[in-house]
Amino acid sequence: MALSSLKKLVTDYLAIDMGTANTIIAVKGRDVVVDEPSLVAISETKDEIVAVGLEAAEMRGREGRDIVVVAPLSAGVVADYEKTKHMLAYFVKKAKSGGSQVTREAVLSVLSDVTHVEQRAMLNAAEESGIGRVHMLEEGLAAAFGVGVDPDDKRASAVVDIGAASLNIAVVTKGAISHSRSERIGSDQINEAITLHIKRNLGLQIGTETAEEIKRNFVSAVVPDDLQDEMLVKGRDLQTGSPHAVTITAGEVYPIAEKIVRRIAEVIKDTLTELRPEVAADIYDRGIVLTGGGALLRDIDKYIREFIDLSVIIPDEPRYATVRGLLKMFDAPELLDRVSRNEPGILADSEISFET
């Protein structure tokens, strides 16, 4: 009975993919249990956080007079330490089951070019969320494991993770990254470009939610079949300030999105030219795998396939590739020790200088 009671207080190990747009947490034996926007709502009059995640997202664009909704992560790293810590603590608590108060261990994804200061901030935020021990793993490597890349495979595999604000390319051989590249570009830039276009050319100001809906339901990475296909967009008229609506066409928004997709494809192509001959031969045979939320953009696999002249694969649920790769590490502790990015000696000397 005592052992049974103790087990109820301990949550199975957590895998945490904390991204600019969403935070995804999976628990060993339970898969994904949290998938919410990485947002917090703050009361400016009380100077306190009043909502996190989905609840904060529902306020965005419709905030009360003293409420502001912010994203404490920027381009995949901590921009506001205190708000990130609060947000992560909320999500970790939500992931715990059975009234658990203790989390033994967690694996957290980080960008391949994360600085020591950024890494230290992520580590501290996780530790202060009640986690006993925190491991950090490169996002590209986690995504590779999540899509089924075998850590013992001597042949190279290439995984491209397209996030909201970051692009991570990882070439994995024998369970380690042999080549990687990160760029601060992602699918959110499509939203920003569409918002700017509608504002400048149509005189309508739209919100974040509307821009995301346009991208998700109306934008294609390749030339659409019907360039005259229309979508009604609602927002605020810039001249009168009144509620208003305009019509946009598929042919109008396609070139806006294509500019961003082309930049992503160019980074991928440039990275592939840097590979050693044997690695390049493996990638020629296998192609690349796209993961992350950006992989859900309509026909992006077709666009990149034509651009780099290699096969492109999108797995089922590409948004969950990274967190499921992190989750696999608990079944391979020796591999986790080998590939972990934790550098305690260096981290101890780093100072956190983020806005609080």
Image (spheres, rainbow, N blue to C red):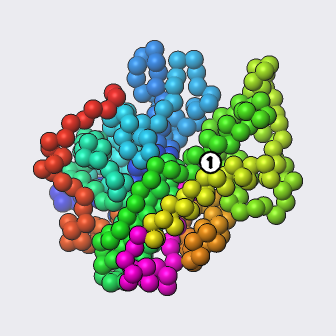
On the rendered image, what quadrant is the N terminus found in? bottom left
**Residue furthest out toward the top:** 45
Q: Quadrant of residue 16?
A: bottom left
| Relative to 332, residue 112 above or below | above
Report whether 219 appears left or right of 305. Answer: right
Is 67 part of what is drawn in magenta?
no
Residue 330 percent coordinates (x, y): 28, 67
Query: Which residue is rendered at x = 50% and y = 50% of the image?
Result: 185
Q: Amino acid at mark 1?
A: Ile
Is 278 part of what is drawn in magenta?
yes
Report whether 355 appears left or right of 208. Answer: left
Residue 111 visible in rendering: yes
| Relative to 3, residue 56 above or below | above
Q: Please state the extent of the stretch shown in magenta in the rendering.
A: 274-294
Q: What residue sits right under mark 1 in the picture?
A: 190
Query: Which residue is rendered at x = 49% and y = 85% of the image?
Result: 285
Residue 4 percent coordinates (x, y): 23, 60
Residue 101 visible in rendering: no
Residue 182 percent coordinates (x, y): 41, 56
| Relative to 281, residue 80 above or below | above
Query: Which residue is rendered at x = 53% and y = 41% of the image?
Result: 54
Marks counted in the figure total 1
On the rendered image, what quadrant is the C terminus found in? top left
Query: Which residue is rendered at x = 49% and y = 82% of the image?
Result: 284
Nearest to the observer: residue 81 or residue 289: 289
